[in-house]
Image (tube, rainbow, N blue to C red):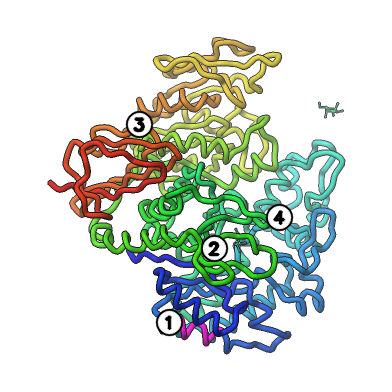
Amino acid sequence: MKPYIGAAYYPELWDKKEIVKDIKRMKDIGINLVRIAEFAWAYIEPEEGRFDLDWLHEIITILEKNNIDVMLCTPTAAPPSWLTSKYPEVLAKDSDGRAYVHGSRRHYCHNTPKYIEFSDKITEKLAKEFSNYSGVVAWHLDNEFGCHIRECYCDNCRRKFQEWLKQVYGTIDNLNAKWGTGVWSQRYDDFSQVPLPQKTPSTHNPSLLFRYKNFMSTTFSQFAHRQADIIRKYTKTPVTTNGMPAYHEIDYEEMYGKLDFIAMDLYTLPGNFHEIAFEYDWMRPFKKNKPFWLIETSATSAGGLVPWSILTHKPGALRCKMWTTFAMGGEAVAFWLWRSQWSGQEMEHGSVTYSWGEYTLAEEQIRRVVAESQKARDFLNETKPPEPEVAIHYSYQSIWIFNYGHTAKEFTYLAEMYKYYSGFLFSNINRDLVYPGADISKYKTVFSPFQPIFSKKMLGKMEKFLENGGTWIIGPLSGFRTEDVTAYKTAAYGPLEDMLNIHVRHRLPPDEQGKPISIDWKGIGKSNANFWLDAYEPKSGNKVIASYSNGPVKGMPAIIETKAGKGKAIVFGTLPDKLTFMKWLNLTQKANKTPFLKAFSDGIVIIPRLDKNNLLKGAFLLNLTENAGKVVFSKECRDLFTGRILPAELDIAPYEVFLVQRTT
Ligand code: GLA
Ligand code: GLA
């Protein structure tokens, strides 16, 4: 483990005297990575076809000399004005068909041939020129595909969407059949008639909405992969880009599948640090052998592109965020940005240094983490976290369906995922978040909540998993849509019902003239039935775990268990309250084994460290909350950051972090 502590830097905006001072300060505080050039197109290619690369050579050389590694970006997130004025067709269009004007960023359409041509050229130029620097340790594509605008409605996108649909469906009759376009006489005679989801008097067909999101996501990935392929002609240096999971709505299984490692941007409020853990839990297993980078996060506050600053860190929260990254499998924490902008849209955004050069309030905590990481390095290199036995499915298909298609009232996919995920996190049940394409054979238990689509491939995989003795926990709101987001005509859950020998008899919203519906959960208690009700008709061998206690399906099973292969499936027809769910979770799932801890309070996340023989050597103790907590040791432990032996009862302040090692 390195680790990297980095920052985004814009040398094109500062004169040489200031750059020299900046680099001196970077070295002084311990910055060993900078990301540059993602918005520098106007400086790299000031006129069409005329490149000015001297300044970039100069800065990379200085950084290399100072042992600061470089992540070099392609600058395509901000096309210059000569390009947008000479070739206005490159501008993206909003859903009313109006072109975005120049003056901000991400105003381009990634499906427009002219833009792709310019993107190819500048990417090739950079790759050719800068592939030989040993200081360039990673390449970075563009900046946040899907940030600000996630869709474009220009003619190129329309044509390309129609061509893409032709590839997916083959014939228009097949598309009509799969989407069920008979409803409201939408039937198409030709692919050229299929619209983009622009203004209509009422809602669009959910299959069309889903495929349009799918298309936008796929073409963002194609655009990224095209740049990556160009870079790879010249260098073996790893290539990635910065994602922002909840916000960009891009299928990262597809996007990062063909990139070399994962980098993410996170601007989470200190009160919601479980959301950071959530991101790390999918990034870590995705590229098992290549640690992820947190490539953008705020050092103090984030402007969020509004002209004021939010997100000021509570005491200790910055250090906690940095250590959580390293504890959960990250190799780098990089700040956005090194030095506050002195002009432009983001002057109020927090940073490591102010525009006038002095350090911000982040200084003390960054210095502390740099020092601590040096002390902890050997121990961290010799130990590793345990392998989780639980996988939780997470998918972009669900984001597209729940955000744009038909859904249950007031249901927000990510909010519910975060809520239930934090149950696993704070119960210290070690888990990976996995995409539908992931290999799940090594896990003991797989949870698949809020996954309307189970593809044929996924069902095959899960059938094997059950045959081999796995436990599959399904739902709520899972398995009820086909791969084209239509309902099944054979059974509510289609082929899943036969596979598991279960039957859904009724599906309905959870409302009885304004009165909430509840369930009786044997051995657990009563809970509200939230968002949706699927009521089962028990088949032979089904075990009823919970039933509806009132409302139109009173007495019918709400949660059932069924044997399948050597394993079993537990199927949720509704979403219980979080606390009830957690009670059940803690009774049925094993928490991390940390025998040197007798007790610990809520909110403390424990990440054990095992040596190569899988012997428990120590653990990270992270307080990810704003509440003070406590840990009681049963064996003597040392704090690796300070070297001191810890008291048997250790108070853990909000956002406090310990890396403890057993002394015996
Ligand atoms: C209206 C329409 C129907 C149907 C219902 C649904 O009354 O005429 O076609 O959409 O709403 O509530
Ligand atoms: C995004 C962008 C950065 C910057 C930050 C501000 O993550 O990638 O360029 O605008 O937001 O928080």
**Picture coordinates of residue 32 (x, y %)?**
41, 71
**Picture coordinates of residue 531 (x, y %)?**
61, 27
Q: Which residue is mark 3?
A: 589
State the CA–CA distance, disc 4 to disc 1. Answer: 47 Å
**Residue 64 is one of the magenta-drawn residues:** yes
Residue at 51 percent of width and 42 percent of height? 271
User: Which element type, helix, strand or loop, lies under badge 2?
Assistant: loop
Q: Which mark is residue 165?
A: 4
> Within the image, what quadrant is residue 230 found in?
bottom right
- Looking at the image, in which quadrant does ligand 1 appear? top right
User: Which element type, helix, strand or loop, lies under badge 1?
Assistant: helix
Residue stretch in magenta: 56-65
Look at the numbered discs 4 and 1 and tell me whether their residues touch, using CB distance below 8 Å.
Answer: no
654 horizontally vs 507: left or right? left
**Dominant SS type (magenta):** helix
Label 3: few (<14), some (14–19) or many (≥20) C-alpha neighbours in 10 Å: some
State the CA–CA distance, disc 2 to disc 4. Answer: 44 Å
**Residue 472 is one of the magenta-drawn residues:** no
Amino acid type assigned to the residue bearing label 3 in the image: Gln
Q: Is residue 258 something one can see in this rendering?
A: no
